[in-house]
Amino acid sequence: MITVSKDKTFALTNAHFSYVFRVSPEGILEHLHYGGPLRDPLDVAVHHLRTQREVASNFQGGPYFSLADTPQEFPSFGTSDYRFPALHGRNSDGNTVFSLHYKNYRIVKDKPRLKKLPSARGGDSETLIVTLEDPLHKLDVELYYTIYQDYGVLVRSAKFKNKGEKELQLQHAFSSALDLPPHDYEILHLHGTWSREFNEERIDVPKGRFVVDSARGTSSAAHNPFIAIVEKGTTEDYGAVHATTLMYSGNFSLSVEKGEFEAVRLLAGINPFNFHWRLKPGKKFCTPEALHVYSDKGLRSMSHIWHEFVRDKISPERFRHKPRPTYLNTWEAAYFDVDEDKVLHLADKAKEIGVDMLVLDDGWFEGRRDDTSSLGDWTADEERFPNGIPALAAKVKAKGLKFGIWFEPEMVNPKSKLFEQHPDWILHVPGRKPSLGRNQLTLDLSRPEIIDYLYGQIDDILSCGDIDYVKWDMNRNMTEVGSAGLPKNRQREVSHRYMLGLYDLLRRLVKKYPDILFENCASGGNRFDLGMLSYMAQNWTSDMCDPIGRLDIINGCSYLFPLDVTAAYIGPSPNHQNGRVSSVETRFNAGAFCAARGISLNEDDIDAHKDQLQSLMAFAKDSAGDFVGGRFDRLIKSKNEVCWQYTSRDERTVYLAYFHIFAAPNLPFRRARMVGLEADADYMLVEDGSRYAGDALIQNGMPLPYVATGQVNDKVRYMAKGDFSSYLFVFKRA
Ligand code: GLA
């Protein structure tokens, strides 16, 4: 996998890609290739960059060599490259010019884990560690590159070490830099907001710099930490893709720069805006891991590579390929109006329609009647839950259900006992009134005593032993980010120290409770990233429970995330987020391929649709094993139609979901060309036993149902009349 030549060309190669760079005659780490696998990766023709350009500044006075057009592994600023650098800061002389030169390398079997940050698991992997140094300012930068035998993912990170006697300050401390050669590229990224996460945007790589980032303290729904640089015209099945994500849940930056000579630089790391880290003599600073995927087979193949890797190397191992329980969540069934009787009653309803788990969402703790109070006081409300949570959990479990509960540990309401006792425990800056978000303030997780307090509070509830699932919520972006626990000259470290505190808390909790299924939530997808998902097997995908609203969200989310990590329930109609009226069937189908499926309906709604809910939950339960570890494919996505395929891991069952958004007369007869089937096998449609040849489904496609508008006849497979129709096919391989 890793080879090194005598003259220090480094190559990482597996069946998916080759990644090659060398030490240039000037001692710079010069990037040579990141693309398809090469027969002899050390045999890459080096572009002769050493030509005098007009106006170029020549590196260190040498002839004909400028960093301005040299592809580099870890660029810095001030020595002839004017593009955004991976390293920038204040050195021991007080200026900002660093210059990194090759020092040495080592190769380790497998993959070192980061101590304080989440990191991908190793196994069948090798890691190349190249050390660069700035001898003048005694800064060492170790670049980590991990390649796996069987995965198309390259994991990179950087470690900064102050080897000198004076303080250094880091402002750009990116995890990875990638200089791609000039080409006609586009950017695909995922943007959004609350309840409209994961919208896809495709744009030409512009001249200048294009950045997706966050300064909100969470990775955020505004820009998911994901970007793909694709060859112009790339489709699901064709085209070269370089995709990157950062395994980090706070302020990130993914910056793409097309410079004057058309090369494209991608930097992935902590957002340098508002970041400043003091690196004392002898200290180290580790960056989060940046994950890179290359595929020359389009977006489908890119997604398959991500999905397999996230399942195998990131998501908690305990839940890998493990069917998720179906559930009833109290949120849209009752909102804050919950008490022991009501929950037990809903548990009976859950039992009647055959779901596996009752989840008690917001509203159970001291004084919590609406969103204006009580966050921070994690003891059961005495009036409404007089017997406490452990007793309730035991009663729910005695009915043969699992029990889950909601927390929002990182927050406090000004109206709470915790805030009265510790007003300085929030993120705040002296002299300024803190901004509120959903009436709440953010606790200062950069302080170890607060981490210990939260651990104690949550542990008190979980230790009863009857809790199977925890929904971990976080419902505001951070403002006035300052800490009473740090000196003035370290205030710009608070956001990152917050993340280190949060990760520490999660690590401790999941270690003590490995069997509890944790679901990550931040008003839905406001912190949906691989950092959180390395502790929690599931993510509440979005608060958008309208099925049509959900289609784009799942589509976008699936570029990076396997649907194993997603959850979706049947919510009320008219929908509470956008008012749309839709059928129970379509509400289910839009989330049918999410691993965790359930309902959040009140008693009347459950009674009104009891038979249908029973049969949908029975289907969800029977198919739960298929929706972990299988293959998801986006087949059709237009303004009015969406079609997805899901193939179970054993490839015996294939699901096809088709959504038709607005009805119209005289529609074309559509087909969906299916993918990844066995051409020689036959597939039987479960609903009527009809048989289809695998090759015909692949080449000719499955005829899709027709939206009934006029007369119907029994020769055509119809969908429900009107808007927002959907149809779910189930095939069994014969
Ligand atoms: C957030 C979550 C919801 C629900 C509420 C409770 O909005 O995304 O699912 O848990 O909080 O307050």
Image (cartoon, grey):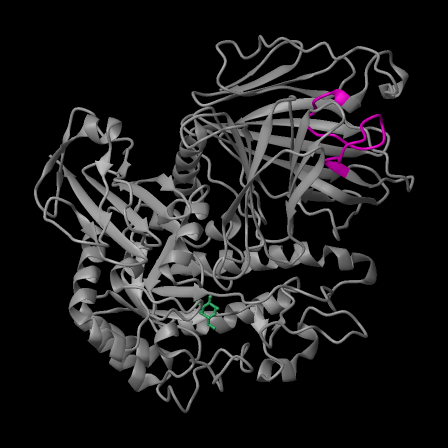
Q: Where is residue 54 in the image (x, y as percent from the top left)?
A: 87, 16
Q: Position of residue 565 (x, y in %)?
A: 39, 51
Q: Residue at x 26, y 39 (%)?
A: 649
Whether residue 84 is in magenta: the answer is yes
Q: Could you tell me if residue 514 is visible in this image?
A: no
Report which quarter residue 325 is drawn in.
bottom left
In this rendered view, identify the residue nearer to me: 682 or 531: 682
Q: In this view, does 730 lie to the left or right of 427?
A: left
Above or below, 162 relative to 252: above
In this rendered view, identify the residue nearer to me: 730 or 105: 730
Report which quarter residue 410 is drawn in.
bottom right
Q: In this view, does 306 lie to the left or right of 499?
A: left
Q: Which residue is drawn at 58% across and 40% down?
A: 289
Counting the numbered discs, the total is 0
Above or below, 342 relative to 290: below
Above or below, 183 relative to 332: above
Q: Main secondary structure of the magenta part?
A: loop
Assign the C terminus to one quadrant of the image: top left
Whether residue 345 is in magenta: the answer is no
Report which quarter residue 393 is drawn in.
bottom left
Q: Where is residue 181 in the image (x, y as percent from the top left)?
A: 64, 21
Q: In this view, does 398 lie to the left or right of 519?
A: left
Q: Residue furthest bottom?
A: 383
Q: Where is residue 464 in the image (x, y as percent from the top left)?
A: 36, 73
Q: Residue at x 53, y 81 (%)?
A: 374
Q: Could you tell me if residue 265 is visible in this image?
A: yes
Q: What stretch is highlighted in magenta?
A: 69-87
Q: Is residue 725 left or right of residue 284?
A: left
